[in-house]
Amino acid sequence: MTSSINTQRKIRYLLLGVLFFMTFFINISFGSVEISIKTILESVFGPTTQNSQLDYIIHHYRIPKAITAVIVGAGLSISGLLMQTLFKNPLAGPYVLGISSGASLGAALYIMGATALGAFLPQWLIGNWSTTIAASIGSFSVLFIVATVATRIKNTMALLIIGLMFGSLSSAVVSILAFFSSKESLQKFVFWTYGNLGNLALSDIGILGLFVGIGSFVSILNTNALNAMLLGNDYAISLGISLKKTSLIILIATGLIAGSITAFVGPIAFLGLAVPHICRLIWNTSNHKILIPTSLLMGAIFMLISDSIAQLPGSAKVLPINAITALFGSPIVIWLLVRKKQIQL
């Protein structure tokens, strides 16, 4: 019986890997200029496509954007899984601690009124990095406050409520800023909230990948502790696990991932909440040794597909990625829940 289950899981992993590479190259091919998979393979692995314009599009725009989609999808999925395990709440997501709201507040302060921020930053940081820096300051400020609070209280539900209150407070300030802002700055902020995967240079992708990689590596190191926490705090303590220390590590890892993603590409909703549930339903397990790698892969695939749909193949227009993740993902989760008739953590 166990051998049969392991074989099924290996087949699913293989199919997931094949699906990942398929969606990666399909994502590169879609856009205002459609590029065939053959041309992409020739450009990537061959000497040249004999079309410098296509080579430029593939290497300087499409591939970086696809890599960004992989990092963002994987990062949000793993951080959502961590939050659902920590709070034992199926509705918890990567932004439940108010980190996204903090990033939005930082971006709003810069875009819609706090231009004085430039006076406190070196000139070489002003420009394309301005909104990213402001959002990073906002997200990591909230993370610092939440992590400090976490060292003083033991109740994770109280921590969840505090995070939600930070989110509400940040949203209130953003609303006030929006009310008094000019039409141009308000429009700029709204576009930022839509999320954008295509504006990052390779250096930006490297920094984003570093933060997400550190957070993911920390979660992998704490796999056994995460499994024990699902069985109850008393059981985890009996195994010698420090709940306070583990909770703080999970919070910091989630903050690094969610905060950096929001700062670089804007708030991406739904994915971090939905993908861990999809993985649990498909693999029928709560074992983090299985859920962590599958969430990383499934999140990357989900984001690649969502971004491909947002490209509106054959059109120069691009739909908000935030809308596509929910529009595409919600029916899948509903279908899986109806089919399985239950949900578990």
Image (spheres, rainbow, N blue to C red):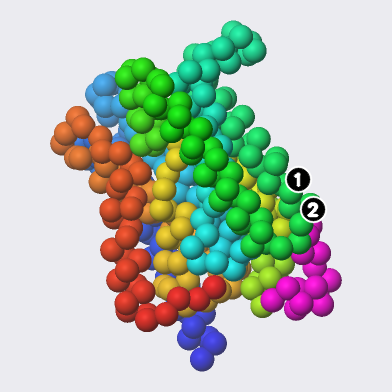
* In this picture, residue 215 sits left or right of residue 313: right
Q: Which mark is residue 152?
A: 2
Q: Residue at x 35, y 30 (%)?
A: 191
Report whether residue 232 is seen.
yes
The amino acid on which the numbered mark 1 sits, given as a three-letter code, is Thr
Would you say residue 201 is visible in this rendering? no
The percent position of residue 338, horizontal first and vertical second, equals: 32, 77
Seen at 33% across and 53% down, the residue is 326
In this rendering, the answer to whether 109 lies above or below 271 is above
Q: Residue furthest left?
A: 314
| Residue 310 sits in quarter | top left
Magenta stretch secondary structure, dominant: helix
Amino acid type, residue under disc 2 in the picture? Arg
Label 2–label 1 contact, CB within 8 A: yes
Residue 342 % position (x, y): 42, 80
Within 10 Å of disc 1 (Cα), the crowding (few <14, some 14-19, many 20+) is: few
**Please, is residue 128 above or below residue 26 in the view?**
above
Which image quadrant for residue 200?
top left
As drawn, 193 above or below 270:
above
Which of the two residues, 16 or 185, is positioned nearer the viewer here?
185
Residue 132 in percent (x, y) is at 52, 26
Which element type, helix, strand or loop, lies under badge 1?
helix
Q: Residue at x 66, y 78 (%)?
A: 231
Q: CA distance from mark 2 to mark 1?
A: 7 Å
Q: Residue 161's mark?
A: none
Look at the image and give the residue range highlighted in magenta: 232-245
Query: Seen in the image, is 182 located left or right of residue 234?
Result: left
Whether 72 is drawn above or below 104: the answer is: below
| Residue underneath mark 1 | 148
Q: Quadrant of the C terminus?
A: bottom right
Is 173 situated left or right of 246 in this image? left
